[in-house]
Image (cartoon, rainbow, N blue to C red):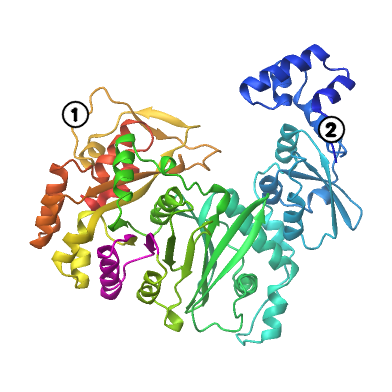
Amino acid sequence: MTHKPLGQIFKEMGLVTEYDIQQALAKQKETGEAIGQILVGNGLVTEVDLSRALAEQKGMEFVDLEKVEIPPEVIDLIDHTTAETFQVMPLEFDGSTLVVAVSRPDNLSVLDDLRFSLPEVSNFKARVANEEQVKKAIETYYQDGRSNMDELLAGVGTAALESDGATDLAQLEADANAGPVVKLLNMVLLQAIRDRAADIHLEPFEHEFKVRYRVDGVLYEMMPPPIHLARAVISRVKVMASLDIAETRLPQDGRIELNVGGNPIDLRVSTLPTMYGESVVLRILDRSNLALDLEKLGFRPDELDAFRNLVAKPNGIILVTGPTGSGKTTTLYSVLMEANSVDVKIITTEDPVEYDLEGVIQVQVQEEIGLTFADCLRSILRQDPDKILVGEVRDLETAQIAVESSLTGHIVYSTLHTNDAPSSVTRILDLGLEPFLIAATLEGVIAQRLARRICLNCKTPYDPTEQELYELELTATETQGREFYFGKGCKSCNGTGYKGRVALFEMMIVNDRLRDLIMNSASTAELRSAAREDGMRTLRDSGLLHIYDGISTIEEVVRETISTV
């Protein structure tokens, strides 16, 4: 179907002339900006005019939200979280079809998301509204600015969901598929995704059922659902992840695939039996926000050049180290994607495979059937790879095979869990690997952390206290003339003062001096001292630069690097 050009629609509406259109088209060739936005910027049409024209172009109805009154019973069909997440407003409901206002007529996949979120509604129909009007309507009709958890829970009866402790499969399935339970879990998921959470924790205790999100590395608690809903909600998660809902004695792992707002979302599910039921953690893997680009990881120009030279080596072992959730996988995936080409064969062995990398052969470790990292690595070597990624060096056998792989002309990337780069050598020695093998194969170690960024909307200058400077091992004289910032807290950052994270890097490139020290089983302190003398920037040094640049705070950098100094 051929759509009528926007310029022509505006001309037919009597808002622009042919000359205006030609001028806009000329500017579009220069800037690449959409013609509608150019005409808005020139003051020839309004944002509402643009929305009306886009609706006509797509053959959809336009609605002016300032001229409609939405009944409360229709508003109640979509909670605040769902409305804000998808940027939609309910307009009409005839008992089967719900009419909603959307701001983007090019993304009608939002209707599929609503079907997932509102299984009780049979049909959906979209009308186009101005984006600002949609936002204003959400603020107006959901004045308290929070999800209607209270209303939702008030409508959940306890009789059908209370349990006497018996495990009845039919009852479990019925509870898991109960409408209120489905809606509650959907609301929890959507809220977490909207707030950029990395993990969702569902934790039953003796007298409460906690729901917590991890945002930018920090856990926050949301309003807890009633304790009697715990088993039903957790059963619902297990159903969605295709897990055995009757098995509550053993840990289970699964995966859920969602599509939210047109964006693919993967949820990695882990269950753990506890005294008061199963604890569940859902790791949110948002593929739309995954930026596998070395230049977007946060390296400074000099660090990026050194890192690229390091990972481009034809053989050897390169390690990325840091605690869980520090971005190790993202860093290594970015390395692989930059190297990924038709003449390079890349194979990975991971536990679990977090993201699907096009053009890369990825193998899932399955220790329950005897497929370990070591077993995978042996088989990978017979597949004629050029580059190998081993998810983690966990034991001596895996370390030995990785060494053998590097000695036979392969470059091996892997991860460790250590506090800093120099201690990685000590960790591998503790596994039982001979010092001369480490010295011969190890090319470099990158330690990393993720520190929270100051929210740009509430960023405020301040003078640090003597205690804060002491924690950084700095004096007032050393910081004279420098500006320091913190986030006061605002709506944009949910009052935390932080929004997003920035990477801190510590890169230890193994040179001849360090190889001699490794050969002689030098201590971590000796390796760190030598690496610093050779120009290594520590995690604390990296954090200081981010503080001086006004990107992060003293408190945050100290928190993330306290174990490395």
- Image quarter of the N terminus: top right
The residue that mark 1 highlights is 478
Q: Position of residue 496 (x, y in %)?
A: 47, 43
Vertical side of 191 occupied by 416: above or below: below
As drawn, the residue found furthest toward the left would be: 520
Residue 58 visible in image: yes
| Residue 389 sits inside the magenta stretch | yes
Q: Which residues are magenta?
A: 385-412
Around disc 2, counting alpha carbons within 10 Å, would you say few (fewer than 14), some (14 to 19), or many (20 or more)? some
The residue that mark 2 highlights is 64
Q: Position of residue 223 (x, y in %)?
A: 58, 57
Vertical side of 169 occupied by 514: above or below: above
Left or right of residue 16: residue 318: left
Q: Residue at x 85, y 23 (%)?
A: 8
Q: Nearer the viewer, residue 207 or 354?
A: 354
Q: Nearer the viewer, residue 327 or 477?
A: 327
Q: Position of residue 29 (x, y in %)?
A: 66, 22
| Residue 59 sits inside the magenta stretch | no
